[in-house]
Image (cartoon, grey):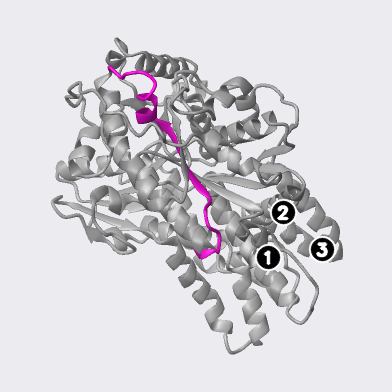
Amino acid sequence: MHFLDHPPRFLFFTGKGGVGKTSIACASALRLAGEGHRVLLVSTDPASNVGQVFGIEIGNHVTAVPEVANLSALEIDPQAAAQAYRDRIVGPVRGVLPAGVVKGIEEQLSGACTVEIAAFDEFTALLTDAALTADFEHIIFDTAPTGHTIRLLQLPGAWSGFLEDGKGDASCLGPLAGLEKQRAQYQAAVQALANPATSRLVLVARAQASTLREAERTHNELAAIGLSQQYLVINGVFPIEEAAQDPLAAAICRREQAALAAMPEALLALPSDHLALKPFDMVGLAALRQLLSATPPRVVANPVAAISTDAPSLSQLVDEIAADGHGLVMLMGKGGVGKTTLAAAVAVELAHRGLSVHLTTSDPAAHLTETLSGTLEHLSVSRIDPHTVTEQYRAQVLATKGAKLDAAGRALLEEDLRSPCTEEIAVFQAFSRVIREAGTKFVVMDTAPTGHTLLLDATGAYHRDIVRQMADSHAHFVTPMMRLQDPKQTKVLLVTLAETTPVLEAVNLQADLKRAGIEPWAWVINNSVAASAMTAPLTSPLLQQRARNEQVEIAQVATRHASRYALVPLLKEEPIGVQRLLQLAGDVSTSTPASNND
């Protein structure tokens, strides 16, 4: 494995959701520990499943992994980190400033931006505080910092004076107020990240055009800020030998080989490794040890018993949705599960029935236009482009609040508005405008992988602020959060795969939504090999085994997690274009088997 040749002290794994970062990080940690190196595996993912992969409880403290000598793990808890960060900022002024002012500061610190900054506080300590990691030779990070997070650390350090002068009330000066105390630590962290002698960044992708484009974007963004020591791992490549006698396997191989042949030039220059798709989920030590093995696991051909023929199709869910005549339909889930494609399929199916539909996305990596590959009567398409709406928001703030500032104050305001926190408010405002349309038509929204966190944080903060302001008024008002909580106005579809980790993450997302008073309306299990087996026998031993594994997860969703669900088969052809999207929404017992990747 090139990415593990002469490994430096710090290894970072990053990539689009669903590509296998956690599995590869865990397998790498196992290999280095097995070679006698003392290893600390750290997850900075808010939806970390490192503990679940190893089958143990880890949490926000260094925990030795049983049965693996030399290996310990740590899951940074972003929410706990955010609370400690808030306490550090608010603590000194509590009891000194009026209660209303303190409450306002706490509200400023309640959003997703604070969580990101606070988690990075913990992350940078591991990079810069030798005492914390003195017992380990290698620190492996599952989920590296993004380029915009690193840029946040490079902002000027004059926030305190700006706040004290009463000039700052823009996007997230509250969260940024705590940065000054950590300035030296952050500078040291950026230097460590950019030093090839100590740090290596591993881009993880799949043999799919969309994830390769995302890897190229990440490569360029990080290289531009000095993180040039990068490697590429293509994970889950379908073994060509499985394609000989199985039409579905052959179609998957053709699609993947075409994507690899068209790989972006920037990625071709990187040292790279290909990891074969395995017939089992990456859970448990035995599975992880096989992930990096050059010897393929032995799989015996064994025909798959058919799953229930009455498994609901996506079209059947749309029947219920269409009966309302209008409303907001939001597709949520981990990256890589197919939200974009399924959002397009739902929208096309509704429009095909003569209903007015607005299809939109808040995912910066979305490819709705490519997926639709055409137009359809009654269907309009838009994108909440974070860059565009953020630029519009910056211009608005500068034209209003900035007009009252002197040159120094305006310069600091402009710097603040370049921070990634500004995006939180800008996207929320655009989101609020779009969902108002759902009162007269269908609005189908494809959310970013972490979009639910941003939207719930910003929507909840706005809701609390409006309720507080209207407390003494008898005026009627409806906030975006109230729309999301009303099942007559909003239907949330959780998208997952029939695999252990994606189902677990969907369960966690469902719990998050319920805590916000939002009850998910249905689950959609995408890319199901077991569903494909209903239409044509599988002869590939690997596909047969994966179909058997899926049946357990499908049963869990159907009987334990979902009040209603739909099953969408893995198809031979990419579901691009209106006709294939209509086919995708059809009955699984009559569909022609394709791939439905994000």
Which residue is painted at 61% across and 43% down in the image? Answer: 321
Q: Are marks 1 and 2 in contact (CB under 8 Å)?
A: yes
Estimate the spatial distance between the alpha carbons at disc 1 and disc 2, rounded to whole Å: 11 Å
In the image, what residue occupies the spot 76% across and 48% down?
Answer: 437
Q: Earlier in the sequence, mark 1 or mark 3?
A: 3
Q: Which mark is residue 401?
A: 3
Picture disc at residue 432: 2
CA separation, marks 1 and 3? Answer: 20 Å
Q: Which span of residues is magenta-colored?
A: 515-539
Q: Are marks 2 and 3 in contact (CB under 8 Å)?
A: no
Dot 1 lies on which element?
helix
User: What type is the residue that disc 1 sits on?
Assistant: Tyr
Rendered location of residue 165, percent (x, y): 74, 74
Q: Residue reaching furthest bottom? A: 95
Q: Which residue is mark 1?
A: 462
Residue 544 numbered mark, or none: none
Against 111, residue 95 (above or below) is below
Give the residue at the far top of this rendering. 244
Q: Nearer the viewer, mark 1 or mark 3?
A: 1
Instruction: Give the amino acid at mark 3.
Output: Lys
Q: Which type of secondary structure does the marked residue at label 2 adopt?
A: helix
